[in-house]
Amino acid sequence: MTDVTPGPRPVDETDLPVVDFHPYRWGDPSHFVTLSERITGALGLVGITTSERPPTPLGELVLPDTGLTAELLDTLREAVGDGSVSTEHDDRTAHANGWSTPDLLRLRGNALVDAPDAVVRPADEAGVESVLRWCGEQRVAVVPFGGGTSVVGGLTAERGGFAGVIALDLAALDRLLDVDAESRILTFEAGTRGPRAEELAAEHGFTIGHFPQSYAGATIGGYAAARSAGQSSAGYGRFDEMVVGLTLVTPRGTIEIGNAPRSAAGPDWRQIILGSEGAFGVITRVRVRVRPLPETRVFEGWRFADFGAGAAALRRLAQDGPRPTVLRLSDEIETLVNLADPNESLEENPGGCLAIVGFEGTAADVAARREAVTTILRDLGGEELGTAPGEAWREGRFNAPYLRDPLLENGVLIETLETATFWSRLTEVRDAVNTALTTALGDQGTPCIPMCHISHVYETGASLYFTVAAAQTEDPVAQWAVAKTAVNETLLRIGAAPSHHHGIGVDHQGVYTEQLGTLAVEALQAIKQTLDPSGVVNPGILLPRAGH
Amino acid sequence: MTDVTPGPRPVDETDLPVVDFHPYRWGDPSHFVTLSERITGALGLVGITTSERPPTPLGELVLPDTGLTAELLDTLREAVGDGSVSTEHDDRTAHANGWSTPDLLRLRGNALVDAPDAVVRPADEAGVESVLRWCGEQRVAVVPFGGGTSVVGGLTAERGGFAGVIALDLAALDRLLDVDAESRILTFEAGTRGPRAEELAAEHGFTIGHFPQSYAGATIGGYAAARSAGQSSAGYGRFDEMVVGLTLVTPRGTIEIGNAPRSAAGPDWRQIILGSEGAFGVITRVRVRVRPLPETRVFEGWRFADFGAGAAALRRLAQDGPRPTVLRLSDEIETLVNLADPNESLEENPGGCLAIVGFEGTAADVAARREAVTTILRDLGGEELGTAPGEAWREGRFNAPYLRDPLLENGVLIETLETATFWSRLTEVRDAVNTALTTALGDQGTPCIPMCHISHVYETGASLYFTVAAAQTEDPVAQWAVAKTAVNETLLRIGAAPSHHHGIGVDHQGVYTEQLGTLAVEALQAIKQTLDPSGVVNPGILLPRAGH
């Protein structure tokens, strides 16, 4: 246990700066990377050829003219008051899309389908209320915009039947409004980005403990709206488990939820707003359960003979404890490719399946849990790899997505998707998704590498996260659509979750509504109809438009 | 740690038989008790006088004639198929009311306000579907009836505008349908009572771990519909946390929810059905997360100087762990009266505030948690009282409500209510509710004893459970209504939960809808309107009827 070093929380990758983002590149511009020869070589070894696919320069991107009349824009400026309204080309471009690979490909290929007519930045919650009222009255569609990091088409609302579409950027709503240290509850404005929220929490000795891969860009409101789950979910829980209260602004007024830790007062309204993806209104405030800043942390690697053995070990910890703070398992192919550590050569890869096991907390708690977990994992056939692979994963954990941009520029199609299922069905679901991906891409003449890991565990089951790479065809957007459709059809057929933590947006709407059934979808549409009678808030996102 | 005795799960009070219940007495008839002289003496000491209030014999209870025509009853018998339809006096009486004190007083006083016109017992889920369709078509109101243990008026649906009211008794739906041992999920039919469900789970080596005080009577479906929380919630969680999936039968069709442990697929439909109290339809199946049967258990008592010191100790365990399986704290008055152990004389009462700390699990886990908790509680000023008070509480934990019947017969008004709030507001809320109770009852010339305990803890807050006793006035139903109104107004004013685990029914509807606000109530009514367009399912329960 010599790696446990008590003391104040170390500065680490979770202390990322809040930055302006590039419209079609992932994350913080200061982290942009190029493709190493090791990676291009490795791709060649598995039959993925590279080619040059330079993106359209930003200034040359073609956008439709703004569809809002000067009169409407004037009344919108009145409605937003202290905030701002922009119809600038770059503002509209930056708010047109999320961070999915098809989103990026459309921008790179100068093939934007649509863009908001204006970007509105309210100064406060009153501004949001006023803008939503205006949208309802003027029948202008409105897309709530937090970090803009959706990877499921959550920002591409439907324009049909509306006088225009605006993006409602919540960046100015980034304050910590209240600290209840005794109850361990912090109240944030919804536009607060992950790193800023952690910084504010740390000033009071707390951490939220929510570190999704979109951490640098995503906001507190976005975490709630899309049911985000972070890399430390085994210890800190999913974001929806951290939410104590919410404020939802709708075109018809404001709903404030959460006056007790738990209650028996009817359906849980928190769980109606969580996951609503802006379809019911705009989340403006979130009350979040926090934890004390950890004194110490230790991350280590374990190797299991195969995915089944590793999954059984994770299941044991998830069901009987003790729970590590981070608990992940890569399958054989992901372990081999090991994108998490691009400095390691393929030859040195230990094979089998790599698990990452991380602990954060007080020194005594970390030591006790680590000791108990070590005994259990040894008993279950795990081989200790020490802290080097664990620390390498921790240091690189926000970096993997940065590789996507140079890969796309070198003609490689790369994308991720995810689901969740019960333990008894885990292998069946993984195999079915892998088959869907390899068949759909292979049939197009582009064999793929499908990689998978478990990153979130529960007593009854786990998530499955897939990363897939293949050579791009001439039309990579269409190429990926075939694979995505095949996976969605597979999830529908076998009855696994449409998404574990990416959300629904438009990309998962088919499998989502089919699984839910007409009646349950109608009931959700009835909620929307009540809160947003003119249907202006994120039309077509999450729910199909009633009557469309 | 000498009290830890590993071995198979001991037979205990959780192995209660499934029995037929008396219409106006609590629980299992074989457990009925009379009032000891110690208790009448103690009541006298605190100024509560007793008097004889014999109840109306069952056969003499006056009911309105059944309002259903012979033709309707014939088509109902056709609809229910293999099930049965009864219009017998005793059946209708037994389904007229729940187990709240006003419910019992109305029956005892031969002042039943209403009773269902018929009691329908479907043989299976198809029968439920068929009966609900019939109700929708015939505009007959239907009250889903599990154990009939509601203490918030959850069984007294509104009759106005309907052709009649039937009780839909789910007693025949009591099977274990599926066992997924690897994922630790059992699928029960909703009418399975607590003890039977535990028995079925134990056959596969599992426990649900849900032991509310209504355990002997309540059903799996009722636990879900009313968001029940059991005495072991610190270790096993609330029932709503155990629910993996649900089947809801509505007049328009059936909704099946829960294909993953967690997902990001929109609002959580489980959390829409949980707490819906039959207003959206009838829960027919529940998939429940289970745990291995504990090898061992140990319960012990701790004394704290006052409620504040004890609450701080509970908060410490709830926030930083380790969590005991049971964690409770009685305030000074409840500790003094100590209804949990009627054999102990007042003189021997140790004073201060009694906490019960219980552990269940593997021998190693129980020993480790107990040791860590002992250290923490000692540090926080707790005095160890050993296992005697803990075991006394455990043995008597289902007995306290049996005292209510002889108390009512001896002219004592006794009732319970509960709420939840955040840690920073716990003392304020407790004091405000106590003041409301003592003022409302004292002003009627009947000074009361208000007792309070914490029985459910969370990271951000806790529940507060009140038991209050006073001498009955001439009209104890009206007497209690004054007190209940005062408490509801207090909860509304200070913003605490309308209920932590009893639910809303009709008794809490005012404070519930006021807190939620018009817009959120309308949205829930829109769900109901979608699933139950003629509004026949539990009209007026949970939600006010739209337009009424």
Image (cartoon, coloured by chain):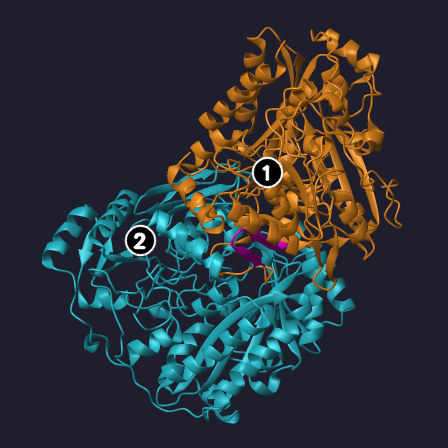
Chain colours: A orange, B cyan
| Residue A256, magenta (yes or no) | yes
> Could you tell me if the residues under marks 1 and 2 are in contact, i.e. CB atoms within 8 Å?
no
For the residue pair A139 and A537, the one nearer the viewer reads as A139
Estimate the spatial distance between the alpha carbons at disc 1 and disc 2, rounded to whole Å: 61 Å
Which quadrant: the N terminus of chain B? bottom right
Q: In the image, which is nearer the foreground, mark 1 or mark 2?
A: 1
Q: Is residue B523 magenta?
A: no
Residue B413, quarter of picture: bottom left
Location of mark 2 (residue) = B170
- The residue identified by callout 1 is A69
Q: Which mark is residue A150?
A: none
Please say if A504 is above or below B114. Answer: above
SS class, disc 2: loop
**Residue at the spot 41% in from the left edge and 45% down from the top edge:** A523
Which residues make up the magenta segment?
A244-257
Residue B174, visible in the rendered structure: no
The number of numbered discs placed on residues in the rendered structure image is: 2
Point 55% across, 85% down: residue: B345
Disc 2 is attached to a residue of which chain? B
The single residue placed furthest to the front in the displayed view is A71
User: Is A170 drawn above or below residue A256 in the view shown?
Assistant: above
Q: Is residue A283 left or right of residue B444?
A: right
B136 and A54: which is toward the camera: A54
Q: Kindly identify the amino acid type of the residue bearing the numbered disc 2.
A: Leu
Q: Position of residue B277 (x, y in %)?
A: 40, 57
> Residue A97: x, y in percent?
64, 30
| Residue type, numbered disc 1 | Thr
